[in-house]
């Protein structure tokens, strides 16, 4: 029990004292014990008063009258001895009751001292609890303020990120539109380049036909001159000789110009031109989806195309 009344430091008290309930129970127990001791003291006082009254009554009631030393004196003496024995017993009981009363009084003094210490401890505990409650409230307020600040910062950061993402998305959309425009322009340029290429192929095919016609006329003139000079010459022999001469001349011309062109014989065989036979090759111009496609051999590989056949005059 004395350890429960040991004084404790309140400097490091940050939480409610876990022994508070036990101290309160001890306080209630001490109060009950004090009330019981007071009741016992009152009972002892009443008993002492009663003993004193009884002793006086017995002493007065049992006091014998004066005798002359007869048998009555002996009886009175015995009666007095009996009264003295009862008186001594009553005095012993009274002394015991007084001793118990003094002991109870000392215990009550100790109990009062302990109650005073307990009241001081309770006051200190209440003060510590009040301090801890104030610290807890301050901590709650600080935590709430920090939480509010952190929430506002998080909201601001979220708004900033959303703004940044919106700007990035706008940039992506702008770049996407620019890429679509560039793709469209590239398709137009590719279409124009294809159209130019087809026109160049058409001109090259037309140049081949013109060159073939010029070679055919040159061959015809050479055959006529050889017939007049040598007489009867076979047409096939003359054509072969003219082809060889033209081929040699063409090789000389291409070597001097540094251009690799097919020989007249190869061009004639490719275009279906024979000696002594006038052949008019056809150049087919196709209109496919507003694009001009030149097909030099006259073939029609694609289905569903609009064909317009033109006879090119060989002049």
Image: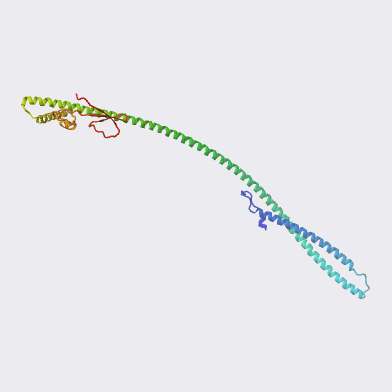
For the point 89% across and 67% down, the residue is: 61
For the point 85% across and 65% down, the residue is: 54
Q: Which quadrant of the figure has residue 43?
A: bottom right
Q: What x and y, as percent, mark residue 68?
A: 94, 73
* Along the line of sight, the residue nearer the viewer: 98 or 4: 4
Q: Residue lying furthest right in this view?
A: 68
Residue 25 showing in the rendered view: yes
Q: What x and y, as percent, mark residue 206?
A: 22, 27
- In the displayed structure, does residue 257 sit left or right of residue 127? left
Vertical comparison of 128 with 92: above or below: above
- In the displayed structure, does residue 261 sit left or right of residue 92? left
Q: How is the image coloured?
A: rainbow
* Along the line of sight, the residue nearer the viewer: 52 or 215: 215
- Quadrant position of the N terminus in the picture: bottom right
Q: Residue lying furthest top in this view?
A: 315
Q: Which quadrant of the figure has residue 57?
A: bottom right
Q: What x and y, as percent, mark residue 156?
A: 52, 37
Residue 197 showing in the rendered view: no
Q: Residue lying furthest bottom in this view?
A: 71
For the point 13% across and 26% down, the residue is: 220
Q: What x and y, as percent, mark residue 207?
A: 21, 27
Q: Count every numbered label the image shows and give the total.
A: 0
Vertical comparison of 121 with 241: above or below: below
- In the displayed structure, does residue 38 sit left or right of residue 3? right
Vertical comparison of 54 with 166: above or below: below
For the point 67% across and 57% down, the residue is: 2
Vertical comparison of 70 with 221: above or below: below
- Quadrant position of the C terminus in the picture: top left
């Amino acid at each position: 029990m004395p350890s429960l009344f040991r004084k404790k430091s309140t400097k490091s008290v940050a939480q409610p004292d876990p022994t508070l309930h036990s101290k309160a129970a001890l306080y209630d127990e001490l109060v009950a014990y004090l009330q019981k001791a007071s009741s016992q003291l009152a009972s002892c006082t009443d008993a002492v008063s009663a003993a004193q009254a009884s002793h006086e009554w017995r002493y007065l009631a049992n006091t014998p009258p004066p005798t002359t030393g007869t048998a009555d004196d002996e009886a009175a003496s015995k009666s007095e001895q009996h009264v003295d024995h009862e008186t001594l017993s009553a005095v012993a009981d009274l002394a015991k009751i007084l001793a118990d009363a003094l002991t109870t009084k000392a215990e009550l003094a100790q109990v009062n001292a302990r109650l005073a210490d307990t009241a001081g401890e309770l006051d200190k505990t209440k003060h510590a609890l009040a301090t801890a409650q104030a610290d807890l409230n301050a901590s709650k307020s600080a935590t709430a303020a920090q939480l509010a600040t952190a929430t506002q910062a998080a909201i601001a950061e979220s708004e900033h990120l959303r703004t940044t993402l919106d700007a990035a998305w706008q940039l992506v959309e702008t770049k996407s539109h620019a890429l679509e425009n560039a793709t469209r322009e590239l398709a137009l340029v590719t279409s124009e380049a294809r159209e130019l290429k087809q026109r160049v192929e058409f001109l090259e095919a037309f140049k081949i036909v013109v060159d073939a016609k010029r070679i055919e006329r040159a061959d015809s003139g050479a055959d006529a001159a050889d017939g007049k000079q040598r007489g009867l010459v076979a047409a096939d022999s003359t054509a072969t000789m003219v082809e060889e001469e033209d081929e040699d001349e063409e090789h000389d011309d291409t070597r001097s110009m540094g251009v690799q062109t097919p020989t007249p014989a190869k061009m004639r065989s490719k275009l279906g031109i024979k000696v002594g036979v006038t052949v008019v090759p056809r150049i087919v111009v196709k209109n496919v989806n507003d694009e001009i496609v030149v097909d030099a051999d006259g073939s029609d590989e694609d289905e569903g195309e609009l064909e317009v056949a033109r006879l090119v005059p060989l002049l």
